[in-house]
Each structure stands twice: as C-alpha cells, then as structure tokens.
Amino acid sequence: MTNDTPPVAKRVANERVHHGDVVVDEYAWLIDKDDPDTVAYLEAENAYTEQVTGHLDQPRETIFQEIKNRTQETDLSVPTRKRNWWYYSRTVEGKQYGIQCRVAADGETPPVMGEDGGPLPGEQVLLDGNELAGEADFFAVGTSVVSPDGTKLAFSTDFKGDERFTLRFKDLVTGETLPDAIPGISYGGTWSADGTTFFYTVVDDAWRPYRLYRHTVGGPADSDVLVYEENDERFWVGIGLTRSERYLMLNVGSKITSEVRILDAADPAGEFELVRPRKTGVEYGLDHAKDGFLVLHNDGAENFELATAPVDDPGVWTPLIAHREDTRLLDVDAFATHTVVHFRRDGLTGIRIMPHDGEPYEIEFPEPLYTAEPGGNPEFHTARLRLGYTSMVTPPSVYDYDLAARELILLKQRPVLGGFDPADYEQHREWATAEDGTRVPISIVTRRGTPRPAPMVLYGYGSYEMSIDPAFSVARLSLLDRGVIFAVAHIRGGGEMGRRWYEEGKLTRKKNTFSDFVACARHLKASGWAGDVIVRGGSAGGLLMGAAANLAPGEFAGVVAEVPFVDALNTILDPSLPLTVIEWDEWGDPLHNADVYAYMKSYSPYENVEAEKYPPILAITSLNDTRVFYHEPAKWIARLRATASGGPFLLKTQMGAGHGGRSGRYDSWREEAFTLSWILDRLGVHEVAGPEATVEPVG
C-alpha cells in the first residue's frame, strides 16, 4: 500500500445483542490502543492524510505565519491584585508556554509591560511552563493555586494529555520545590485559610473525580486523609474556597443534581456540614456574603433564582431575585459591599450590580453582539469589578468597572498586529426557522464589503448547556480576509436562549440539535449569505458534524470534526469507559432503557452511515484523549470509506496529545493552519487577501 492509497481497516466479526437488537461492529478492535495493529492503522491513516494534503504545505505555512505575525508573541496579561501582590502571566517570543509571575503591590493601578517587553521590576517567577516542559512533546498545568498568605504554591502537571496530573508544592519564600509529590489527581484544589493544608480530588477508572483528600504540606502523601468519597457513579466531587476565605465548599454534582457541604476554612480538620441533601433535578451553589450565604438554585425555577441563607442554617433559602422566564441566571459573586450577578437574556450575556446600599442596575455595552463576563476578582473588599469583553470584531478586552463612578475603564485589549482594524469587519445576527417552527439565532462575522453569497464556515456545538457566544479569533482573520464568512449556529442543546433551550436539545429531544443546525445552513443559503458551506465542530460538536452529514450530506462542501463523539451509542452503552455513567443524564441510559437505545441508535453517526455520496470529511483526534477516545473517529472514517461514496475521508491522529490537541502555542497554531488550509482548499478560495479573493465553486 502506498501513502496515496486510502488505508483499509480490517473487519473483524463482532456481534453484540442489546434489547433484542443484534449489533455488528466490525471495527470494535480499534479500541485497543496497545494492539500493534491499531497503532499501525492510525499511522497509516496519518501517512495517507499527509500525502493527500501535501499540496497544502505552502498555504499551511502561509496561514501559520499570518497567525504568528498577528500575535504579539511577547506579552503580559493584566495583573490581578490579591492582597499584597499583583499576579499575572506573560509569554515570550519563541517560547511555547506561558510564565506565571507576581510583583509586590505598591498601589491600586496594575503595572504594565515596558517597551522592551522584559520582566517587570521586582518580578518573582512562580511557574515557567517552558522550563517545566523541557523537551516533552506535551505539557499542561492543571492546578496553580497560591496559598491565602501568599507563601506557597500548589501546582500540578500532565506530560501525556490524559488529564491525570501530579501535584507538587513550591515554597515562594525560598523558591524551593518541596519533596511532596502526589500523582493521579484531577484538576483544581484548595488551600485551608492558614496555608498548611491542601485539599485535592482524585479520579476513578472512569475518569470521575470521586474522592477528596486532605494533605498536610511537608508530610508524606500516603498519610493524606480521605475526607469524602462519592460512590454514586453519576456524581463527581469538587472543592473550592469562598472569596471571603471563610469557608471551604465541597461540591458534589451530576449533570442535573448538586449537593454542597461547607466547612470553616480555619478548621481544615473539621467535619463538612451538609447544606441541603441532593434532590434529583435540583442544582444549587453557594457563595459567602458578609452576613450569610447567597444561593443560586433551580428548585422550582427553571432559569434559576437567587436566594439568601443564614450562616447558622444555610439550608433555609429566602428569595432575593425571583425566577424570570426571559433571563437565565448563570453565576453570582459576593463581595463585601456588593453582589454581582452574571446572566443571559435574548441570546446575550449581561452583568448586574447589586450594591448593598443602593438599587441594582445592569452594565451597558456598546455592540449589538458581544460576550461579557466577570473576570478574576479574588479580593473580597474591592471598589472595582474586573470583567472580560469580546465580540466577533472586538479582540478580547479586560476592563475594570469603577463601582462608584459606574464607569468602564479599559485596561487592555489583546493586540492584533499587521494593520488590523475592527472597522474592516462587521457582525450580524440572523434567525433561522427550525423544523418545528422554533427560531434559532445565528451569529455572523464577515469582512466589510465581502460580496454575497460567499463561501462560509458554519460552526456548531449544541450540548451540555454550553453556549458558543460571540467571540473574536485571530486565526479566523485568515478566512475573513480571503472573503470567507464565518457563522455560529446557536442551536438547541446549548444554553444561548436559557435553560429550556438546553432541555429541548438533550435526551429524547436530542435530534432537535441536528435538525436546527441543518436548518441554519439552509437558511444561510436561502437568505443569500452563503454559497458553499464547510461545517465545523468538536467533541459533542463532532457528534453534531457526523449527525448533520448523515441528515443532509448534500448541503455541505466539507466537514471538519475535531475529537468527534461519533460513536456515541457504543460509548454510552459501556459503563466501563470514562464518563459514561455520568453522561446518562445528558444522553439517556441505552444500556437499561430500550426506548433510549432505539432513539440513540437512530441518530448516532457511526450507526447511520449510508451508501450515499458524502462531502469531504476531515476528522482530527488524539491518542491520549480521555474524554472522546480516538477510536470513535477512527471507526467512523473506516465505515464511511467502506460504505459511502464521495469524500475523501481523512483521519489525523495526534499520537502524543489529549482532548485539546497539541499543547504548545506554536504547535497549536500549526494545527489550526493545517485545518484552515484544508477548509480554504475545499472552498476553492485562492491565496488572494481581501474581499476581492477569487473563489471557484466546489464541484
């Protein structure tokens, strides 16, 4: 077999019976990544993809250079004040990873980077990702938490991409890394108030954080105390510290239910107190205010309501902000003099300020499409609110909101080099009509003056109540400047239009997600926006890509599916796989429910590949992904190649990465450049910058 010949996956007899249904899965053998045949097949697929896309080497390099040249490689984040220090991260030209730092605070104004781009005066480096990574192919930091007194750092690292981290501690007074080393922990972790004790979680074989441990810094890991263990496989465990630093919060949650326990942070060896026992379908969370707790919950309130609770009886809730049909309350932050509520209304986010001594009000923002959310606000006593803002034409911006003056103060907008001018671009909101008459919002960004209809990239996700809000992308400019329009379909299953939007796109209403997306693509064509359309999505959005390709293969000029959840039925049938039992609240339980099984089988992409002409498909995955296993796209591509016509069907596997792909920023830019060059090639867009780019229709 030569590299320009598509690999042919061997077919192995594999029959299973579920609810009387005989299932044939001839590519099930690919799940064993220790099998030499599996590795050989993935490498053959990589070689084929490299051969087929070899003509894109120059366009790929061009786009990589565009991303690089638009990025200020040596840069500094806006420092965040925490007691006597300003904390920030910075990047250095030519280095893959960020550097976490701090400087002593001598005023209320954050320090700014000097013209030379070097370290700030008096800088203390907390973590240098480049030194820690060394020559490793993959590197990620999972936890980085400074103790309340500022003298210690807890941090964790991953060198494989499987999201199982090793926890270590650094003495910030001496600079010494302590001998404590605890492998196999999950993300996150929290200090006690006095900084002597650190709480962390570990995962079970299904990658579920299920145990909370208490570690005494300087002591042996085998002496760590098991504080809590969650035996219900639907639930996971997390730990946090309130902004006031008065209470530790032990959070236990499933997809639809939560339970909180609290403990005085000054008594880390004490017993956590249960706030309210779990009740199926009820989610709640707490933050400590000056005189009690704030509780955000959905008990009888679909879009959530905000309540208060006394410290001595936190399970008694008194309404503060009543439920509204048109407003989804997302989060609440308690401060000494005010409360901040993050909400969603009419498909956009917003921020409400509630002064303790005045009337509540909402911050106004200038653009019709935008995303605004509270940023890093670690100080309980503050007269300013740090927040983040972006839109499809405005680069990510950091503001301080002066509570007394009610004024937004721009601290920094991410630099975009190369002559970028936001006035050269415009954003729009369209509404498609779904099969059942529901109006579905679409966000669109285009270079001003781009003739229509134009080639388009349509992005979608539509699961877990995650919202794909309007946001800026440097890499996306390489599409827009070539006359390609970019759009996001805000389909059901996401959270853009409130909790009901999510409920109408999950379980046995999941097909709404897929039909909404196809309706958006058809609307964009019918309304004169789009010519040829490439669709793109990742993870659960990869499931969307596979399902949409099965529903309407003739609608799309190409499909990009990244770490795609395309073998959904087989995965959710297997409780031994990571996250499966947890996922039953999202997709249903096909193992024990015949109706759920039949419904999932009717849409799962792998089961529904037809002997029809499909568009070209590029599937990208990672060997060490613990969320969506590599075998899902590998099996899907094998079945497409054996069953369907059209294509080509390409599989690219990162052999040393996880769910997020390559870890270094230059590596990730190169991977994005590869994807964008493939998209432009499929759209027939020539290498001519600007709205006058020449386009050849895709045959």
Image (cartoon, rainbow, N blue to C red):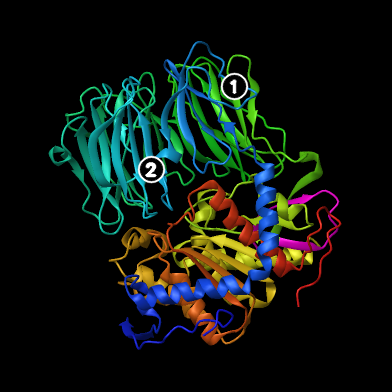
Name the residue that disc number 2 marks: 142
Q: Which secondary structure, mark 1?
A: loop
Q: Position of residue 580 (x, y in %)?
A: 34, 63
Judge the density around disc 2: few (<14), some (14-19), many (≥20) Cα neighbours within 10 Å: some
Name the residue that disc number 1 marks: 112
Q: Position of residue 16 (x, y in %)?
A: 32, 83
| First reached walking from the N terminus: tag 1 or tag 2 | 1
From the viewer's side, name the closer residue of 287 and 382. Answer: 382
Q: Is residue 476 visible?
A: yes
- In the rendered image of this protein, does residue 31 appear above or below residue 466? below
Q: In the rendered structure, which segment of residues is drawn in magenta?
A: 436-456
Q: Residue at x 70, y 61 (%)?
A: 59
Outermost residue toward the left in this view: 223
Q: Quadrant of the C terminus?
A: bottom right
Mark 1–mark 2 CB contact (< 8 Å): no
Q: Is residue 395 left or right of residue 104?
A: right
